[in-house]
Amino acid sequence: MIYFRQPINSALSFIVTLLSVAGLFALLGGSFLFLVQIIIYAGAVLALLLFIIMFLNIKEENLPDEPYKTRWILLMSLLISPFAAYLILAVSRMEFQPLHLQDFGSIKAVGLHLYSHWVVAFEMISILLLIALIGVVILAKKEKGRD
Amino acid sequence: MIDTGHFFILGILLFSIGIVGMVSRRNIFMMYMSIELMLNAVNLILVALSHHHENLDGQVMAIMIIAIAAAEASIFLALFVMLFKNARTLDANFFDLLKQEKHND
């Protein structure tokens, strides 16, 4: 996913990744989160991203030329791999139960939990979304009234 | 037999891929998608922890992260449209206005 030159190939493979993660959510018993991941992430956010990529009409000369891309990716993988290996080692020392398949994150349970323990955070999220909306409107307006 | 630990390992690997993509690419769309990939890895780990402890807090936190990612996506994409209309490029190295000591106009 991170190796493609064209952003649209990368976005399409990112959709596949998101749908796979949604399937893992369903496997872990979060049916509401499964729906949210498919509808909001793979549906809304990535559709918006694909729309913008197609809307910008990116030509070959608009893309940055990255002659050392493969070298950079290999170098960064070498740098990151000790940390990842350390974390994986730490996780594999822990003891886990095998997966028990039950739906404990249903819509009713998550909603009750959300509105009884997380009310303040929920309201803050609504304010954050409002701020993002205002910010986007201001960004789009400034561009029009510049000259 | 898979257990919760495998989900942690997958989350760690996804996060590492996100960091590698974030640092080593110069296309701003790739950087944005790497950030989203890292957020998704954290989501996966939170849901696995919530399954492990039989507690719904992790899933609620994952929903919060998805809401924040949606807000972030709208602002990022508006910025990308503006940057591309002004500069006609997607190169992150090109956007260095803050680096120049005096602007020439």
Image (cartoon, rainbow, N blue to C red):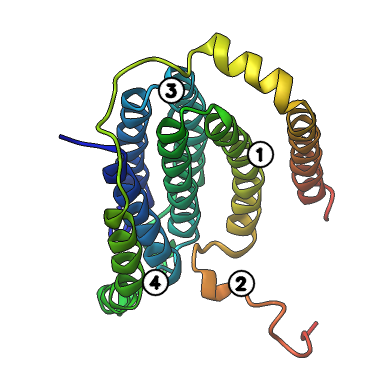
Q: Which quadrant of the figure has residue A120? A: top right
User: Tag 4 or tag 1, which sits nearer the N-term?
Assistant: 4
**Dot label at residue A30:** 3
Of the pair B24 and A128, the residue shown nearer to us: A128
Give the labeled residue for mark 1.
B71
Q: Amino acid at mark 3?
A: Gly
Q: Amino acid at mark 4?
A: Ser
Residue plotted at (36% across, 49% down): B11
In space, the residues marked 1 and 4 are separated at their CA atoms by 25 Å
Place of residue B24 in the rendered image (x, y in percent of width and height, measured from the top left): 39, 71
Of the pair B62 and B80, the residue shown nearer to us: B62
- In-image side of A107 versus A35 (left or right): right
Look at the numbered disc 4 and give the secondary structure of its residue: helix
Look at the numbered disc 2 and give the secondary structure of its residue: loop
Give the labeled residue for mark 4.
B24
Check if mark 1 and mark 4 are on a common chain.
Answer: yes
Are discs 2 and 3 less than 8 Å apart at CB? Answer: no
In space, the residues marked 1 and 3 are separated at their CA atoms by 23 Å
In space, the residues marked 1 and 2 are separated at their CA atoms by 23 Å
Place of residue B41 in the rendered image (x, y in percent of width and height, measured from the top left): 42, 47
Look at the numbered disc 1 and give the secondary structure of its residue: helix
Look at the image and tell me whether residue B1 can be seen: yes
